[in-house]
Image (spheres, rainbow, N blue to C red):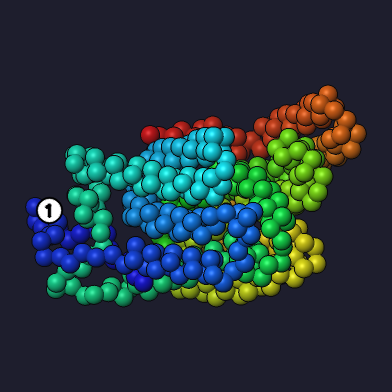
Amino acid sequence: MPEWEYKPKLEPNNQPLMANMFKFSFRVPLGLFWSLFLGWVWSQILEVPDPNVVPSYGVGVAAFGLSAVVELLGEPFWVLAQTHMLVRLKVIAESLSIILKCILTAVLVVWLPHWGLYIFSLAQLLYTTVLVFCYAIHFMKLTNSQESTKKSLPISRMTDFLPHITLDGTFVNWKEAKLTWSFFQQSFLKQILTEGERYVMTFLNVLNFGDQGVYDIVNNLGSLVARLVFQPIEESFYIFFAKVLERGKSVKLQKQEDVAMAATVLESLLKLVLLIGLTITVFGYSYSQLALDIYGGSMLSTGSGPVLLRCYCLYVLLLAVNGVTECFTFASMSEKEVDRYNFIMLALSFTFLLSSYFLTEWQGSVGFIFANCFNMGIRIAQSIRYIYRYYRESPHRPLAGLLPSPFLIVVYVLSGVVTGISEVFLCCERGWLARLLHIIVGALCLGATLVTVFFTETKLIFFIRTQFLPKYTQKKT
């Protein structure tokens, strides 16, 4: 379904022609339809937990479907905020929504634990409602002030957020519809590649509910850095690359200053996320068991949890690199290149789903992480190939950001060995004093690693101190 243009036609006096427009939106009705349909699938076709163990399962399904529809109401606000880089609005809205959601969840779990799924359903509805209201209130104030003109916003009143067509206009802009269809395919396939193991887990019942619970706990813990650090970087710099570079044009046909700026930023981002990912992988291997023991006790730290979290640390490294490389790739690709890449992603989707099923049958829940690592590796290879070809005719080599200094690699290896030995002798059944010593060993190794980064990766440090942080902070404020 094509997305109609949000920018209204303007009179000579810059007022939108709203009197002769039919306003309608298929987004919310389609979302409601899919929520009802998939809710029926989850409640009637898929395996349903025992009502005596998990009561109110149907209510939970309905509540999460409703929250998805509510969130769709705020999608136009989110798109406009992203386009105009209103990052402060996004941070405030999402932070406030998450904080209120966590507070409500904690209060209800402590005071009304017998409510069960009602707690998480109400918390999810509160999250989406507060999120949409934050965006709506901000743009309501913005459209009633003079700042909308200063910021060159394509709307002048709240009703302009509704897609529309004019009486003398065409029903569908086929150029935009074709591009929208390409991005829909890309988003759908990327969703399969990102969350495919959950569909395999849900529809094929390869894991029981207990193993699914342990996997979800480890997945949520392991993905904290990805959600809090890597995802904001990917979203923000997708917009940056899309604004700096002209989509579909070769390097020679673009402003060389913009090309050089994009290359410098890309190289620094690759080096930054690579170092963060390497740090998580190296230290996460030796501290996964301790983290799970502190978080959930022996129930998590003595089973398959530590192995899952150790493997997930490697997956976080691949996830970090893939986020930045795909961020640049999708921001600079032409429409034909996006369509061509969609065919590659389609093949990857089938391969990923099959590998998830067979690896899980062979290795259990660890097979999901192995399949994800395999999937991410192929996606990184595709993006690196595109970036290399994109900058091949220029003197810039941003992929050098994926090559840390040899001395730093040696320090990472030594840190991994030292913390691994420390885990064997100090963790996790020798009391809290031994655990504290294990933490101190890790802190010392981490400090040595950071000092090595400071003295060996001088280009990255210089960029962050002199260019990246000041400019980024100024744009956000």
The residue sitting at 71% across, 66% down in the picture is: 206
Splitting the image into 4 quarters, where does residue 382 fall?
Answer: bottom right
Q: Quadrant of the C terminus?
A: top left
Q: Residue at x 81, y 49 (%)?
A: 303
Looking at the image, the residue that sits furthest to the front is 52
Q: Residue drawn 56% across and 47% down?
A: 116
Q: Circle 1 sits on which residue? A: 15
The percent position of residue 417, horizontal first and vertical second, equals: 86, 40
**In the image, is residue 49 above or below residue 351?**
above
Mark 1 secondary-structure assignment: loop
Q: Where is residue 131 shown, x and y percent of the image?
A: 39, 45
- Residue 252 can be seen in this image: no
Residue 6: which quarter of the image? bottom left
Q: Nearer the viewer, residue 251 or 174?
A: 174
* Residue 324 appears left or right of 30: right
**408 left or right of 103?**
right
